Amino acid sequence: MDTPTEDVLAGVGPRLRALRRARDTTLAALATETGLTASTLSRLENGRLRPTLEQLLPLARAHGVPLDDLVAAPPTGDPRVHLRPVRRSGLVLVPLTRRAGGIQAYKVVYPPADRAPAVTLQSHEGYEWFYVLNGHVRFVLGDHEHRFGPGEAAEFDTRVPHWIGSADSSPAELLALFGPQGERAHVTPAGH
């Protein structure tokens, strides 16, 4: 008879394989990213190797999921989502999605204009949509500059050089959706 621990560990392999495939990543690429060998990863995914904490931690980081998701930890009954803000280049990013691949959602807080880094246009693969929650946003897209306020939204191809920041002395808060492979967010009016 299987123990609850064996039941939990038996499900780890299929979840690891599904996460890797959702990210469209090879075993070799994941091995480089985690420091585990491709052979170890294959044996974990096929259930031929019992996972250890030392193996699961780098895999959870690589896939961008909590460790609880890898082992399918039982729900605690607490409905709260525990968000972990990340500070990057003066911004505060709060990831709102916990799955690998596909469109990712973020709450982004830009510092006041006088504390923001200099405007440096960037471009990369993907497609982004944002909605201004609070404050005012200065948005530079190619040769054009725009100012957005609360309730206004924009969408753009991130291969076009762009920059986003607060437009004044207050922080700006946005809800952002980003599709790294160019996926677009489609907003459909009610009743259509």
Image: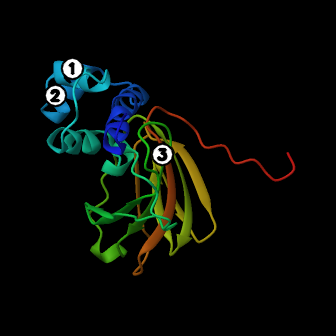
* Residue positioned 25% across, 20% down in the render: 42
The spot of residue 19 in percent (x, y) is: 39, 33
Location of mark 2 (residue): 32
Point out the tag, 2 or 3, that comes first from the N-terminus: 2
Vertical placement of residue 70 versus 172, above or below: above
Location of mark 1 (residue): 28
Relative side of 192 to 42, left or right: right
Count the marks. 3
Marks 3 and 1 in Cβ contact (< 8 Å):
no
Q: Tell me the mark number nearer the camera, choosing from 3 and 1.
A: 1
Quarter of the figure with the C terminus? top right
At mark 3, the secondary structure is: strand
Query: Pointer 1: residues within 10 angstroms few (<14), some, or many (20+)?
Result: some
Location of mark 3 (residue): 178
Relative side of 161 to 57, left or right: right
Q: Nearer the viewer, residue 2 or 112?
A: 2
User: Of the residues shown, which amino acid type is indicated by label 1?
Assistant: Ala
The spot of residue 174 in percent (x, y) is: 50, 64
At mark 1, the secondary structure is: helix
* Residue positioned 46% across, 47% down in the render: 143
Query: Pointer 2: residues within 10 angstroms few (<14), some, or many (20+)?
Result: few
The spot of residue 140 in percent (x, y) is: 45, 54
Query: Pointer 3: residues within 10 angstroms few (<14), some, or many (20+)?
Result: many
Vertical placement of residue 114 versus 11, above or below: below
Marks 2 and 3 in Cβ contact (< 8 Å):
no
